[in-house]
Amino acid sequence: MRKFILYCTLGCLLMFGCSNDEDLIDKESYVSLFLRMQHSWDGESITLSDLNTIKYENANGEKMSVERLRYLISDVTLEKEDGTFIALEDYYLIDVSKEETMVFEISDSIPPDTYKNISFTFGFDNEDNLSGVYPDLNAALWNVPEMLGGGYHFMQLEGKFLDESQEEIGYQYHAIKAVDISGDEPVFQDTFFTVDLGSVTIEGEEELQVSMDVSEWFNNPVQWDLNELHSMMMPNFDAQVMMFHNGQNVFALKGD
Amino acid sequence: MACSRDQGEPEEEYVVYEPIPVSLDIPEFFSSAIVDPVIPPNNPLTKEGIALGKKLFFDPLLSVDQSISCADCHMPINAFTDKETFSEGVAGAKGTRNSMPLFNLAWNYDERFFWDGSAFGLERQVFHPVTDIKEMGNTWQRVVNDLAGSKEYPVLFQKAFGEEGIDSTKVSRAIAQFERTLISSNSKFDQSLRGEIELTQEEENGLAVFLDETRGDCFHCHGNPNNPLWTDNIFHNNGLDSVFVDLGLGKVSGDPADNGKFKTPSLRNLAFTAPYMHDGRFETLREVIDFYSEGLQPSETIDPLMKKIAQGGVLLTEKDKQDLIAFLLTLSDHQFIASPDFKP
């Protein structure tokens, strides 16, 4: 519970509402908006009891498990029909092994309305991805070493798969900002991305269910071969870029 | 203040004590870098509570034959562990786990203590060793009676808790208060972060090995310079055994997926805390590094973070091993083990 409170209280700031008729809105009618993160493998829900079991098969045909899944989302934004938006400057570390991290209050002051899009950033954008500045993420050892550019992980997805000789091999699908450190100077490429969930109508206190299809990380557009790529992916520039591409279709607003 | 019980009664007087609240002396870097420590609302730190906890910690009265105190297995000079593979309890009894060092315990956010996480909360942790037949072997009834029958303790408890009476809960709360004050924050590495000292080239390379996913890759479990704890305080199977003699977390949770998992120990104060691992199997840091480099054992529950299991380990060069040890030793805090605040 403690971390749930932490994640929900750290900087839950309504940064700016850009509605032209803001003064006319009855602020007493503002409501709370919650996100509930859900996780599935190709439509099949992933629960705590599913962790550690080799029961999934990826697009490349490898049997695999999910043992640990943590990821960061930030900057939830609601866009109104008139093109104005409400941007919520905050971040959330979701840990599938901790139920209390899977639902969080985005804000307690959202004007009821129909919004043409709700979005968030997977990971941190460059403005937010600053080394060592978030105590809760430091406490979670979420940092990326300075030799790889610092900042924070975007995701840690770990488990085991059966290799070509049916041996269990660990994999660590860790997403960070892509960096190539093979030359004299590191070369970076952004790998955070905006997840557009589509339109929502908020009438009263609302809990939106957002689903991550974990199988998509291994599927589209890159059919991931764990035999080739299962370890030490943080310093692997190309692997990070592939994760970025595969992440584009991972999230959806449940009910869509 | 001194108060008369009742104006109509004889001149018997009693004293009402108000324990003095104390704020934990949190190092600046701890405050800025990580989340606040865990201090239960029902056991706030007080000057008298800490003093009582310290006295109890060093008092053999807690053991059944009054032969050993907490400090016998948790010695200040060893960063509050001892040098034994398995500590000796009353009547020479020995357990099966290496005594854990004690420091920075208030920052264990999940509040799971012991190698297997079997105690939730520092206060509850205190209950175990007092009655374990391989440790102090006592009963709480006897402990409370002995404390109540002593000359000093009744008033010390009254001062610490503002009321008369002694019970096991108060004992555990007092000791937990003292344990929360055991803060280690002045190692050579801490000093280097504060710009007071520079690491040697070897120590710097050791840190690089530590943080390099293609070499040591220690940081996912043991942390990085942004976190002064040097542990994730959670549970992993780090590849010690293919067949488990001790199930660790698995015995506590009942989940076979947890078999062979033990709590990640902090890397602070390694210079004082040998032998290493939950069963104290490694006498030296070199043995530990050799294990991670070439000695990993496969098992069903081995952590995916033990990446090079197929090769037996991370296969460090001789120089990287030596430099890694040099770095690890910069995390040892000589001021902590010498502090008079933590001695009887």
Image (tube, helix red, strand yellow):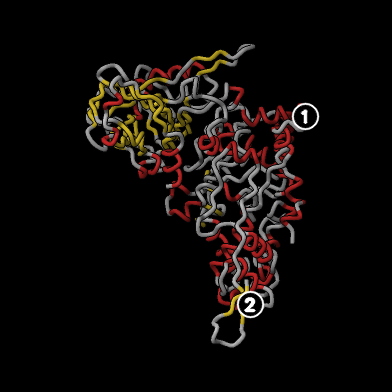
Callout count? 2
Location of the C terminus of chain B by quadrant is: bottom right
In front: A45, or A99? A99
Residue A11: x, y in percent? 45, 34
Q: Amino acid at mark 1?
A: Thr
Few, some or many C-alpha atoms within 10 Å of disc 1 (few <14, some 14-19, many ≥20)?
few
Q: Is residue B59 positioned above or below B303 on the image? A: below
Please identify, in this view, whether the residue under mark 1 or under mark 2 is nearer the observer. 2
Q: Earlier in the sequence, mark 1 or mark 2?
A: 2
In front: A74, or B241? A74
Q: Quadrant of residue B93?
A: bottom right
On residue B200, the disc is 1
Residue B291: x, y in percent? 64, 40
Looking at the image, the residue that sits furthest to the front is: B7
Q: Name the chain under label 2.
A: B
Label 1 residue SS: loop
Q: Residue at x 52, y 47 (%)?
A: B109
Apparent side of residue A171 relative to residue B62 in the rendered image (left or right): left
Q: Name the chain under label 1.
A: B
Residue A217: x, y in percent? 38, 25
Label 2 residue SS: helix
In front: A189, or A116? A116
Few, some or many C-alpha atoms within 10 Å of disc 2 (few <14, some 14-19, many ≥20)?
few
Q: Amino acid at mark 2?
A: Asp
Apparent side of residue A21 relative to residue B20 in the rendered image (left or right): left
- Look at the image and tell me whether residue A38 can be seen: no
Apparent side of residue A247 relative to residue B218 in the rendered image (left or right): left
Q: Is residue A47 positioned above or below B154 on the image? A: above
On residue B146, the disc is 2
Badge 1 vs badge 2, beta-carbon distance below 8 Å? no
